[in-house]
Image (spheres, coloured by chain):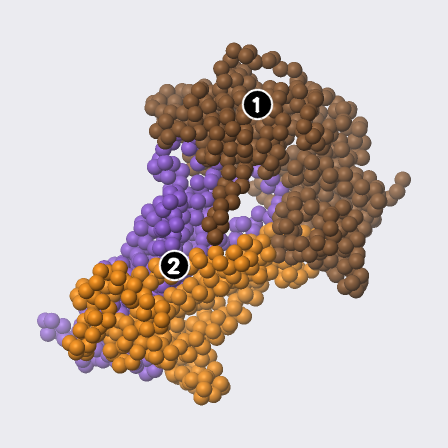
Chain colours: A orange, B brown, C purple
Amino acid sequence: MLMYLCRRIAAIVPVVLIVGVLVFLMLRLTPGDPAAVIAGNSASSEDIAQIRSQLGLDQPIAAQFFIWAGKMVVGDFGESFFYKKTVASLIVDRLEPTLALAVLTIILATVISVPLGALAAYRQGSWVDRVVMGFSVLGFSAPVFVIGYLLIYVFSVKLGWFPVQGYQRLSDGFGGFIYRLILPSITLSIVYIALLARMTRTSVLEVLNEDYVRTARSKGLSSMKVLVRHALRNAAVPIVTVIGVSIALLISGVVVTESVFNIPGLGRLTVDAVLARDYPTVQAVVLLFSLTYVVINLTIDLLYLVLDPRIRY
Amino acid sequence: MNAPVLDVRNLRIRLPAGGDRAYAVNDVSFTVSPGEVVCLVGESGSGKSVISFSVMGLLAKALEIESGGIALQGENLVGASEARLRALRCTRMGMIFQEPMTALNPVMRCGAQIDEVLREHTDLSASMRKTRVLEMIRQVRLPDPERMYTSFPHQLSGGQRQRVMIAMALILEPALLIADEPTTALDVTTQAQILKLIKEMQQTKGAGVLFITHDFGVVAEIADRVIVLKHGSLVEMGGATEVLMRPQQAYTRMLIDAVPAHDPPARQPIAETEPFALRTVDLAKSYNTISLLGRKRSVAAASEVNIEIRRGQTLGIVGESGSGKSTVARCIARLIDPSEGRVLIGGKDFASARLDQLHAMRRKVQVIFQDPYRSLSPRRTVGASIIEGPMNYGIGREEAMQRARKLLDILRLEPSALDRYPHEFSGGQRQRICIARALAMEPELLIADEAVSALDVSVQAQVLRLLEEIRHSLNLAVLFITHDLRVAAQVCDLVAVMCKGRVVEYGSAMQIFTAPQHEYTRALLDAAPGRHFAFAQAGAAA
Amino acid sequence: MSSAIVHEPSSSDSAAEDPVAPTEGLPPVQRNLGVWSRVRRNVSAQIGAALIAVIVLMGVGAPLLSAWDPDGINPAARNKTPGYETTIRDDDGNKVAYRALMGTDTLGRDIYTRVLYGARVSLVIGVSVAALSVAIGLALGVVAGYFRWLDGLVMRFMDGLMAIPAILLAIALVSLSGASLTTVIIAITIPQVPTVVRLVRSIVLMIREEPYVEAAISVGTPTPKILWRHVLPNTFAPLIVQATFLCGSAILLEAILSFLGVGMPSDVPTWGNIMAEGRSLFQIYPHMILFPGIFLAVTVLAINMLGDGLRDSIDPRMSKQL
C-alpha cells in the first residue's frame, strides 16, 4: 500500500523533470538573446542586463536550467515586464476564475454524462443510445468558441437571460458568481460530456459482457441492480481514468472559453501574455497547467486503490 | 418415480442467420429427476451450453427458442416473464460457470456476493443473513469462513472461487443445479475436489444436477445418466454405466475411444546408442523484481531442471498450472533467456549462445504452441508461414514451396491450403499447419507446448497420432509439455513431473504411471477423472 | 477542440457476440477481412466521406465557385449582412453585380469567398498534421514497443509532452517561432505525437506476445523482418482510424490558434481568422462568426463521423487506447 504510493509518486518525478526541461528549452532555443526576449519590447537596457545576470546566461545551459528550476521550485517565476508585477502575484490574481470554471464544468459534465452513457450502454441499439451517441460525435466536433458564441447570441443577446460576458468574483456574492459562470461552464462542458458519455458507454458495455455480470443475472437480480451494483461499479476505473486524461482537454477549453466570455482567468492571461510576448508569464502558466495535469492524474492513480481492490502493491 | 425437476421437451433454438447451421439446439428432450446427476456431453458447438442458458433464461438475444418446452418442477419457463424468471433464479434453479476466475465480481467481497442472493430473495435481517452465509461458506468447505467472507475474489485460488460460486448457487437450496463445465478451467487435483463437493452437496440437498462437460473422464466420475449431443441434436441417452460400457452410437463410441487411457501402452525402447538431441544441465529461470529500496527479490519459475532426450524419443513434462513446465520449454527454445544452467543441443550450449550463433542453432529446435488460433499470422497465407523459416536459411522459394507441399501431404492437408489464409481452417487443421511449419525447418527437437490442449478430444487424438507417426519416421526428439496425464501416458517414453518449478519425479512413462514414487505424482494420478472406471474400450490406443 | 481525443473500442461488434452465443467451435471472425465492405455499409462513414468530398471540392474549386478575390478589400461594402447586393467596377471599369452571399467583414471582404479559401488551409493543415504525426509516432512507437531498453526513455518523454496541454504547447511554439504555415503545422503536430506513440506501442506490445511472432522468432526470422512482416501490418488499420481523428482535431486546433490571434498571419483567409475578425462585432453581425463556424463544425464532424465509421468497421479492440 505504502509502497504503491511511493512508487506512483516516484514515477512522476521524471515526467515533471521532462516538462521542466521542455518549458525551459522553449525559450532558450529561440533565436536571439533570451534576456531581450524575456524583457519584452518595452524593456530598457538595464532591465535586460539585470535579467541576464539573474539567469546566469554566461554559464553553460545545464547550469542555467538548474538556476531556473531552482527558482521555479520556490515559486519565483520572475517578473512580468508587461504587467509590471511578479508573475506569481499575477497568477494568484487569475487563479479563482479558472478554478471555478474548471470545477463547475467537471461536476456538470460528470453528473450529466455518466448516467447518459450508462443508459446508452444498457439500451444499446435503441433510440436513446443513438441520440446519446449522435450528440457525442456532434459534441466533440463543435468548436468551443462556436458553441460559446451561439449560446451568448441565443441566451444573452436574443433572450437576455444571461449577461453577455464577464465574471464576478466569489467575494462579491455567490449568486452572481454562479449566475455568470453558467453559460461558460455549459459551453466548456459540452465537449467533456460528449467524451465522457461515450467512454462511459463503452466501458459499461464491455463490463456488461463480463462473466460476473452473467453471474449477477443468474442470481435473479433486476437489470437496474446489475447495471448499478455490478456494471457501473466495475466501469468506474476506466471512467475515472478518462476524466483524468481529458483534463488536458479541459485546460485547452478553458483558454478558449475565457477568451470568448471575457473571463479574467489564467487562460486569458496566457493568450494575452503570448500576444504581448511576455514570456516569463507564458512559461510559468504552461508549467503550472502541466503540473496540475500531472498531479490530478497522480491523484486518480491513487484513487484506483479505492476503486479496485486488486491493485495493492 | 419422482416427478422430474427439469423437463425439457422438443427444445429447438434457432441460430442467427448466416451460421453454419440453422439450429443451435434441434429437437432435444430430456428430464432431470431430483437427486440425480445428468451429464450433457458434447464437443464444442454441440449446443450443450445453449441448453443450460436457455433453462436459466439467460440466452443471448440473438438466439431464440423456436419451439418446445422447458418445465421446472412443472412450471413452464418458455415465455415466462422476466420478473418470474428472476424470482426463480437461485431460489429454484442455481447455476455455476466454467471460469471461476472471471465469474465473480472483482470489486465486491465474496461474502457480499453470496449475501446478495439472500437480500434479493428473502426478508432475513442482516445478522441472520450473515449467519446463513457463514454457515454456507463452511458447508462448501472453505477454510476460515470469517476471512473468506471479507475476502475479495482475487485473494482466492481458482478452486476456492468455484466453492464461493457453489455456495452462491446453493444457498437457497434450489431444486435444480446447472453446472456448466465447472471444473474445466481447474487443475486436476482441484477438479477432483470440486467434483466431490458437487456430488456431496447434491446428495445432502437432494437437488437435481444438470452437468455440462466435454470430458468422459468427468462423466465417469459424476454422472447417473448421460446425454450425448452433436451439432445441437441428441445422439444418445442412457444410464451412465450403460453408455460408457456399451455405447450404441458410433459417435459416442468415437468420443469414448478418444479419451486416452491411463495406462501407457508398451513402447519400443530407444537404443542407448541414439545421440542426445537435448540435455539440460541445472537449467533455471528466475525473475527479479527490484523493490524501491533496492532490495532484490528473486522468484524462481524453474530451477535445477535436468532432462535428456535422445533422437526418436518423447519426453513429457507434466505439471499443473504454475508448475514451470512452459517456462522450461520456452527456455529451451530460447524464447526467453534462462538465468542459469546449460541447454545442450547437439553438444553445443544453446543457453549461452550469442546472437550470431543463435541463428544457426534455432533451426534445430522448433515449437508448436497451444492456441491454434493465434499461432499463425492471420494476414499471411499458410504457404508464406511455412516457407518463412527455410527461406531465412537461404533456401530458395521454389524449393521451400516444394518442401511445404510434401509436408502438407504428410500431414493430410490439401496442397491448395498453401494459398489460403488461416481463418479458413479449423483448430485441428491449423495445428497441423503449425506442425508443418516446424517440420519445414528439419529440426532435431520438436517442442509441443500444450499443443493439443485447446482441441476437442476427437481432434486431439488425431493430432497425437500424427505426431507419433512423424516422430517415428523422422527420428525426431519430442518434448511434450502437458497438464494432462492421460495424454502424456499415451505418447511419452519418459516423463518428468514438475511441481512449483522443480522436477519432482523423472523416469520412464511406464514406471511413473504404474509405480509412482513421489507423493505429488501419486496425488496427480489419483485425481485424474475417470481413473477407476473401466471404459468400454480401455487402452484402445494401445 | 478535441486535442486529446480519447479512443475507445466501439462496442457495436463486441456486444453482438454475447458470451452465451454458441460460437465455441467456430473460428473467431478475422480482423480486416471484409473491412472495406463493412466500411461501405457503414452509414456514419458514408455520410462523413460524402461531406468531406464536398468540402475538398469547395477548397479545390474555390476560384470557380466565387468570382471574387478573398483578400479584396472594399471600403464601401464593410460589415454587410448576408444577401447584400451592389454593383462594383471590375479591373476593366465595367460594372458588375455583386452579391455577398454570406455578407462581408469589417474590411469589406467577401466572407463566402474567404470561407471557400479557408477550407484549403484547414484541409492542408489537417492532412499534413495527421500524416506527420502518424509517421513520427509510428517510428517512435515501434521502437518503444519492441526495444525494451528504449521504451522507458521514449515513454517518459512522451508522458512529459502529454502533460503540457496541447493548445498551450502549440501557442507557445507558434509565438516563439513566428506564424507561418510550416510553424503552425509543426506546432500542432508535436502535441499530437504522444497519442500515436502510445497507440502504436500498445499494439506492438500486444502483437509481440502473439504466438505467431514467437513462431517467427523460432524459425530464425531476423528482428527487422519480424517488425516489417508481422508487427507493422497490424498497426495500419488502427492508425488509419487514429489519423482521421488527428486530422479533425488538427483542424480544430488551427482554428483555435487563429481565433486567439496566435495562429496563421491574420490576413490569410482561415476559418479561425475570419471568426477572430468578427469577434468584436458579433452581437450586431453574428454572420461573421456563424458561417465559418458552421463550416468548421461540419468539416470536423464529417471527419469524426468517418473516423467512427472506420473504427466500427475495423476490429474494435485494436483501437482501445487512450
Q: Quadrant of residue C23?
A: top right
Question: In which quadrant will I find the N terminus of chain B?
Answer: top right
Quarter holding residue B4 = top right
What residue is at 63 percent from the left and 58 percent from the top? A230
Residue type, label 1: Leu
Question: Is B406 situated left or right of C222 in this image?
Answer: right
- In the image: residue A177, left or right of residue B44: left
Q: Residues within 10 Å of mark 1 (few under 14, many from 20)?
A: many
Q: In which quarter of the image is residue B358?
A: top left
- Disc 2 with disc 1 on a shared chain: no
Amino acid at the residue labelled 2: Val
The residue lying toward the viewer, choosing from C135 and B193, is: B193
Asked if residue B541 is positioned above or below residue A303 in the image, the reply reads above
Mark 2 → mark 1, Cα distance in angstroms? 51 Å
Residue A126 pos. (x, y %) = 57, 60
Per the image, the residue denoted by label 2 is A15
Q: Which of A53 and C33 is in front in this view?
A: A53
* Labels in figure, total: 2
Q: Mark 2 lies on which chain?
A: A
- Percent across and percent down for residue B504 are 62, 29
Q: In the image shown, does C222 or B497 lie closer to the viewer?
A: B497
Q: Mark 1 points at which residue?
A: B315
Query: Residue A77 at x, y = what percent?
Result: 31, 72
Is residue C315 visible to the viewer in this orientation of the structure?
yes
Frontmost residue, B382 versus C187: C187
Q: Mark 1 lies on which chain?
A: B
Q: Which residue lies furthest to the bottom in this view?
A: A172
Please give the name of the residue rendered at 57% of the width and 38% of the height, measured from the top-left corner.
Answer: C26
